[in-house]
Image (cartoon, helix red, strand yellow):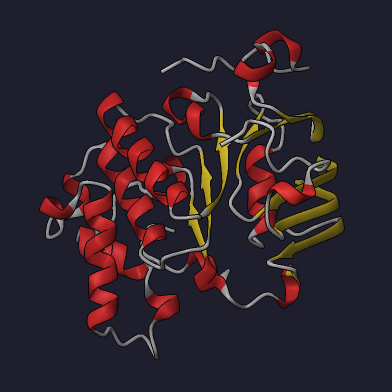
Amino acid sequence: MSATAGTEGDVGAMGEPVISLRGVRADLGGRPVLRGIDLTVRRGEVVALLGANGSGKSTAVRSLIGQVPLAAGEIELFGTPRHRFREWARVGYVPQRTTAASGVPATVTEIVSAGRLARTRFGLFRKADREAVRRALEEVGMADRASDSAFALSGGQQQRVLIARALACEPELLIMDEPMAGVDLASQEVLAGTLREQVAAGTTVLLVLHELGPLEPLIDRAVVLRDGCVVHDGPPPEAVGQHALPGHDHVHPHAAADPIRTGLLS
């Protein structure tokens, strides 16, 4: 993949827009967090959303899936305004583990199965649904822990389960909020391999990252936020030089009731 593929000036390099944010503004606690963001992610792209703590990265993705209301602007998913979008089975969302996996009295299979609910009929699992859950567990290397309680998992294993839950719905768009945060090196490599397979299959990916780490080779574009504004949208840091990105000196590329929230780890 080219580091410059899918930029706003190269529409033909990718497919139609999967994510579109235009003039998006959002407030938290009366404080402006997003200050007029424009962002387009096209089919097949892998886009990293980078920035320091408090820059608005997580708020941007949470506004995208409807967890944070907009003060102004427009959001579209697959060409449909977000407020009218209902095809949530096309979207897999992986929240930050620190807010989503504090210990849940459920088995690994039960948690991952929750991610499949959007594709079931009336919540009834068929053979195809059970197979999708099994494949998702295998993809993240957790098939051998399928019957274990979430309480028994390490932090890295919890993150693998969150990712498996998102993969169980076989999404066309995968949104991940700090998937490598607080995860051991072995789990980082497993997760990078899993994401590599998803990208090869054509999944569109939006990643919130603090560091590129082992995901660096997969990234097509980097979008850097600072104080709720986009200050860079283009090649990732290693392609342009780390210090060339405004407000990006903290990123080291080699450092180690919303429908989508349905599930036991939400």
Residue 136 horizontal/vertical position (percent): 29, 59
Q: Between 97 and 206, which is closer to the camera in this rendering?
A: 206
Which quadrant holds residue 16?
Answer: bottom right
Q: Residue at x 38, y 83 (%)?
A: 120
Asked if 122 appears above or below 201 in the picture, the reply is: below
Q: Quadrant of the N terminus?
A: top right
Q: Is residue 13 left or right of residue 148?
A: right
Asked if 125 appears above or below 190 in the picture, the reply is: below
Residue farthest along the bottom direction in this orientation? 122
Q: Is residue 152 left or right of residue 35?
A: left
Which quadrant holds residue 123?
Answer: bottom left
Residue farthest along the front direction in this orientation? 12
Which quadrant holds residue 226?
Answer: top right
Asked if 79 appears above or below 236 in the picture, the reply is: below
Residue 89 horizontal/vertical position (percent): 50, 72
Residue 151 horizontal/vertical position (percent): 20, 49
Residue 257 appears in the figure: no
Label total for image: 0
Q: Residue at x 68, y 57 (%)?
A: 15
Residue 94 horizontal/vertical position (percent): 46, 51
Residue 98 appears in the figure: yes
Q: Residue at x 66, y 62 (%)?
A: 66
Q: Quadrant of the C terminus?
A: bottom left
Q: Between 244 and 70, which is closer to the camera in this rendering?
A: 244
